[in-house]
Image: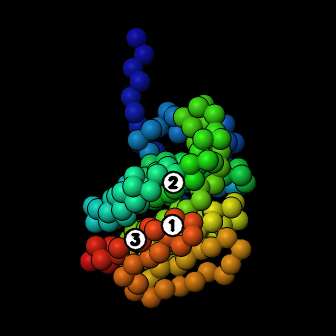
Amino acid sequence: MISHQTIAVNLPSSLKLTLTYEQFVQLAIANRDLQLERTVTGELIVNPPTGSETGNRNSDLTGQLWLWNRQAKLGVTFDSSTGFHLPNGSARAPDAAWVRQDRWDALTPEQRKGFAPLAPDFVVELRSQTDRIESLRDKMREYQANGVLLGWLIDRARKAVEVYRLGQEVEVLEHPMSLSGENILPGFVLDLTEIWN
């Protein structure tokens, strides 16, 4: 009898692994406990779990988005464990995301089960202590280039939010206490009180 034992592999940062999208999907299915992403060039990104503080704050913002959507019934919300197959071929997992209902309904049941082949309408990235700000900015620009209408990069260290809107320059807000979903998420206001604490 052959014994299959799980072995952890530590990759040096200088080593880049590239995968086709199909290979990435196979790897993600075989490693459901890992937070995996794939860049447009096929580079594999393994994201470590967040610390407890970041996880708690991410739960707060995801919960606020979910509650608004539960009442507004305008779309579908997603947490940080959800990956999307973006139009450029990358596979990305924002910390929170929202897709308009009509766009979600246009997907087949099979497409909904895997990495949905679309860019969300709205995304949030919450910077953790280990995140490099430039990597997150690159990710936000990638979302924007793939059609995301509104995105927020929340940087707790600087107490600042970078607002990404489709076809517009990035707006930087210093220590805002709330954020408006604008016309993308009508009536949604994210309370940042707990995020900054």
Up the image or down, 190 lies above or below 62; here it is: below
* Above/below status of 145 relative to 98: below
Query: Contact (CB < 8 A) between labels 2 and 3?
Result: no
Q: Of the numbered discs in the image, which one, if any, rests on residue 74?
A: 2
> Mark 3 is on which residue type?
Leu
How packed mark 2 is, by other alpha carbons closer than 10 Å (few <14, some 14-19, many 20 or more), is some
Q: Is residue 69 above or below residue 8?
A: below
Q: Evaluate whether residue 17 shows in this view.
A: no
Describe the element under mark 3 as helix, strand or loop.
Answer: strand
Question: Is residue 75 visible to the viewer in this orientation of the structure?
Answer: yes
Q: Are marks 1 and 2 in contact (CB under 8 Å)?
A: yes
Q: Is 108 in front, or is 136?
A: 108
How far apart are the alpha carbons under marks 1 and 3? 12 Å
The label on residue 173 is none
Taking the image as shown, residue 12 lies to the left or right of residue 65, namely right
Q: Amino acid at mark 2?
A: Leu
Q: Amino acid at mark 1?
A: Pro
Q: Which residue is mark 1?
A: 186
Along the line of sight, the residue nearer the viewer: 44 or 7:
44
Graded by Cα atoms within 10 Å as few (under 14), some (14 to 19) or many (20 or more), the crowding at tag 3 reads: some
Q: Secondary structure at mark 1?
A: loop
Marks 2 and 3: which is nearer the front? 2
Residue occupying the point 29% across, 62% down = 56
Q: Secondary structure at mark 2?
A: loop
Which part of the image, by quadrant, shows the C terminus? bottom left
Quadrant placement of the N terminus: top left
Going from N to C along the chain, the mark reached first, 1 or 2, is 2
- Expressed as whole percent of the image width and height from the top left, the position of residue 21 reads 67, 42
The residue singled out by tag 3 in the image is 190
Distance between the alpha carbons at the discs numbered 2 and 3: 17 Å
**Residue found at x 63% / y 34%:** 108
- Crowd tier of the residue under label 1, counting other residues whose Cα lies within 10 Å: few below 14, some 14–19, many 20 or above: few
